[in-house]
Amino acid sequence: MKLATFKTAQGASYGIVTGSGIVDLRRYLGNQYPDLKSLVAGNGFAQAAKHLSASADYKTSDIRWLPVIPNPDKIVCVGLNYEEHRAETGRDKTEQPALFLRVAESQVGHKQPIIRPRESIQLDYEAEIAVIIGRPGRRISQKDSWDHIAGYSCYNDGSVREWQRHTIQWTAGKNFTHTGGFGPWMVTADDIPPSTTLTLSCRLNGREMQHATTEQMIFKIPKLIEYISSFTTLLAGDVIVTGTPGGVGARRTPPVWMKPGDKIEIEIDKVGVLENSIADG
């Protein structure tokens, strides 16, 4: 099942994405689950699935896509988690994942413009797989980790490279407003069995820039959940952004930066394609 958050003239809502459009779940479940995060927290997927065959309330062309979870408690991102990317950066191997946080304001939805800030021309792409937490937990073991996943989505961890390099901390370069794409929807975990090998790719103006599978991850998803939940409680709706493969623009010769008018696509098989344009802020 594909679940998305969106906006219409009537305001923000969420629903099921079908072949004919979007079924507005607030129409059916809004009293109990006012948004997608609350549906995830309440494990309301079975109730949502009862409306899979309902007539679409909106065509996808009639809505504005929002980040899949617009209001997560936290977004935990993983750096240097594919060997090819670690090697191209010249950084040493680590025994544990390198982590940083994003804020919700830094995100945009599918088909919304990613903003190149006036402070930079070095806006880079990073294709990533986003894991959305369903069942909350602390100190989750790797063997139990799959039971805590609500679903998966595409993520573009857009990076303002000069600001990322100001210090050894990456926070500034990873959190400019509307630089990260998240969407178009989440595919629920029951559609993607545990340990499924997923293929991840990135295209800039139709040219493939990144391509990898989850087999190439240094730290696999269960390890990430175990490690992160050791120091913080993972809550329903939290997002883990699991790292990018090699081929980022900053490590190309010459470097390749996203610029206004560009189209960037992040594709995960079994999930879909996240598409964003680039605009100046």
Image: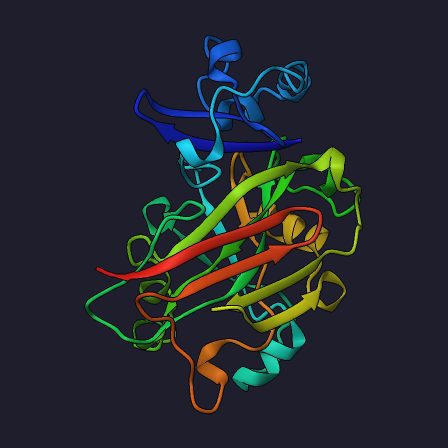
| Horizontal arrangement in the rendering, residue 125 relative to residue 21 (left or right) | left
Give 10 or 31, whichever is nearer the viewer: 10
Q: Quadrant of the C terminus?
A: bottom left
Q: Quadrant of the N terminus?
A: top right
Q: Residue furthest bottom?
A: 253
**Residue for point 50% across, 23% down:** 38
On the question of residue 218 being in view, the answer is: no
Residue 29, above or below 182:
above
**Residue for point 49% across, 86% down:** 252
Give 68 or 202, whichever is nearer the viewer: 202
On the question of residue 57 being in view, the answer is: yes
Marker count (numbered): 0
Q: Position of residue 134 (x, y in %)?
A: 61, 32
| Horizontal arrangement in the rendering, residue 154 relative to residue 70 (left or right) | right
The chosen color scheme is: rainbow
| Horizontal arrangement in the rendering, residue 230 relative to residue 163 (left or right) | right
| Horizontal arrangement in the rendering, residue 255 relative to residue 173 (left or right) | right
Q: Position of residue 84 (x, y in %)?
A: 64, 79
Residue 35, above or below 267:
above
Residue 152, above or below 167:
above
Q: Position of residue 171 (x, y in %)?
A: 36, 62
**Residue for point 34% across, 67% down:** 173
**Residue for point 73% across, 44% down:** 141
Q: Position of residue 178 (x, y in %)?
A: 32, 53
Give 21 or 180, whichever is nearer the viewer: 21
